[in-house]
Amino acid sequence: MQNKWDIDGHAEPHTVNAETEKMKSDLLTLNMGPQHPATHGVLRVEIKTDSEIVAHAIPHLGYLHRCMEKHSENLDYRGVIPFVDRLDYLASMSMEWTYVAAVEKMLGTEVPRRAELLRIMTVELQRIASHLMAFGTYALDLGSFSPFLYAFDEREKILRLFEEVSGARLLYNYIWIGGVWNDWTDEQLQRVGDFCDAFEPETDKYHALVSVNKIFLKRTVDVGILSVQDCFDYGATGPVLRGSGYQWDLRRNMPYSLYPEFEFDVPVGTGEHGTVGDCWNRYIVRMREVKESLKIIRQVLKKIEPGSVMGKVPKVLKLPKGEVYVRHECPRGELGIHLVSEGGDSKEPYRLKVKSPCFTHVSMLPLMAPGQMVADFVATIGSIDIVLGEVDR
Amino acid sequence: MLDTIAAGINAAVPGANAQVLNAEDAKCDGSVLVEAAHIHAVAAHLKASGTMNVLQCITGVDYTEYLEVVYVMAKFDLAAPAQLLLKVRVTDRVNGAVDSIVDLYPAANFQERECWDMLGVRFNNHPDHRRILCPDDWEGFPLRKDYITQKDYRGMQVYPEGKMNMGDREFIVRQDMIKKAQEAAAGKVQ
């Protein structure tokens, strides 16, 4: 990356002559955030700028730290679910499922087939809702207002469906240990199918409106480039890794639940408009994933059969002594849950650690920022699509 | 798989003393324990040999007799993906430290800072050894089992006594009502 202004001294020293000497100035420290709309929450980035060029960016986290991991040590296993909801509040279903999967793995619970299918369906619907949010706010960051309204219109339809089955729009507490809380009626499933049919042509509209828009391309192509090796070094996952052209998806490469039964593609950044791994590629991977999610949902609707939605789970959960680490593919990357139980009569997790993909992606900002314009830095933050609830936990 | 990894570590890093910790319950995950002093060499070996190419996260568990630092590593490989829990144990609760692996895996930068912030394990040679989630002048390490919340923070009370959240207040009111109703019912019976 072009590290001309790198203050760590990794970059080659630029030639000093009378002209550059005249233009030389001190670096200006600028605080972006915590109340900056483009940081998607309460993230503060301390940036050192040389006029309009970012020399260095230091993320400061913790404004939304709610000690979730400490709290969960004093709650029973079921009581933790509402807390994991509040990690990534734009993709609560995915968060719940990862945590529940960790507990179920330790319990050895068998989940009924209908419940698993419903979980896959809700999580894929949630992925669409989350990517729509990313799409809308990203366009908003880059100065276009109307895509936000289109995206929210469609997202609201998904949230309405979720509200019907779980009672809440955003923080559901819907996926429970052993299954799901509430069954979907045939009429509701029919409406999911109708939504898919109505929504698919909408995505083409988004592509025409934003993806190939000249201004959008100018703002995102060749900005914030990440190589696959950078992603491996920093542990990036999800659309960020796939945007760099590595076809890695846990649903495909380390499949869990019933995903091996489903047919879907794993879209990667192909660099139609510039270098692979830039902001545009990360954006387009999300938009293409929406279509793949629709494919999965349609297959669920074909496969689903009547049955129970709750497996046999003891009333008081006592987990064996030991630990598990469970990873799931969430909209923003791989969420990992490290759950430790001390066994015996204990009814609470001994330790619960959440490996957050957004936390990892924020740590890549100092890598991407040097040499960018301040406005491009905003585009970079938007392209990694962070949710601060998950970063700070 | 853990056995081959442990054997590989022992062959490459003398003194690492890698041993496989198998879970008592078959449903749980096993892990590999190495000597804390050799973690940098072990991580270098895992990276160089291509056993694990991604550091997913660094976490810690306080087992009261010792602090355990867990390195969650993964192999991102389309043909043969894998994951590994690599552990070291730190017995010194005051000055306990392990070597930083930021130079090998840049991902460790934030993760080690979080581990220091939450569990108080120092990392030698870390380029930016600060707290990350709590304020810089916070006292104590929240995820330790013997953690006591500080009373004041910059003149603010951390847990004001008179201040309760509405849920707790409603709970107490409800309990009072139930108690009164029970007393009234008991009175009637008598």
Image (spheres, coloured by chain):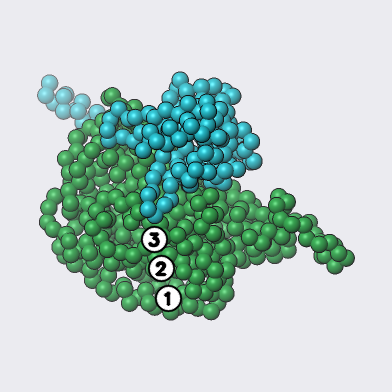
Chain colours: A green, B cyan
Of residue A52 and residue A113, the one placed in the foreground of this image is A113
Check residue A224 in the rendering and tell me which mark sits there, or answer none: none
Above or below: residue A201 compared with residue A6: below
Check residue A207 in the rendering and tell me which mark sits there, or answer none: 1
Could you tell me how far apart the alpha carbons at marks 1 and 3 are, in whole angstroms? 17 Å
Q: Earlier in the sequence, mark 2 or mark 1?
A: 1
Of residue A165 and residue B35, the one placed in the foreground of this image is B35
Task: Judge if badges 1 and 3 mark residues of a common chain.
Answer: yes
Q: Which residue is mark 3?
A: A130
Label 3, residues with CA under 10 Å away: few <14, some 14-19, many ≥20: many
Q: Please report contact status of discs 2 and 1: CB closer than 8 Å, yes or no.
A: yes
Could you tell me how far apart the alpha carbons at marks 3 and 2 are, in whole angstroms? 11 Å
Q: Position of residue A227 (x, y in %)?
A: 54, 59
Q: Amino acid at mark 1?
A: His
Q: Amino acid at mark 2?
A: Met
Q: Which residue is mark 2?
A: A287
Q: Earlier in the sequence, mark 1 or mark 3?
A: 3
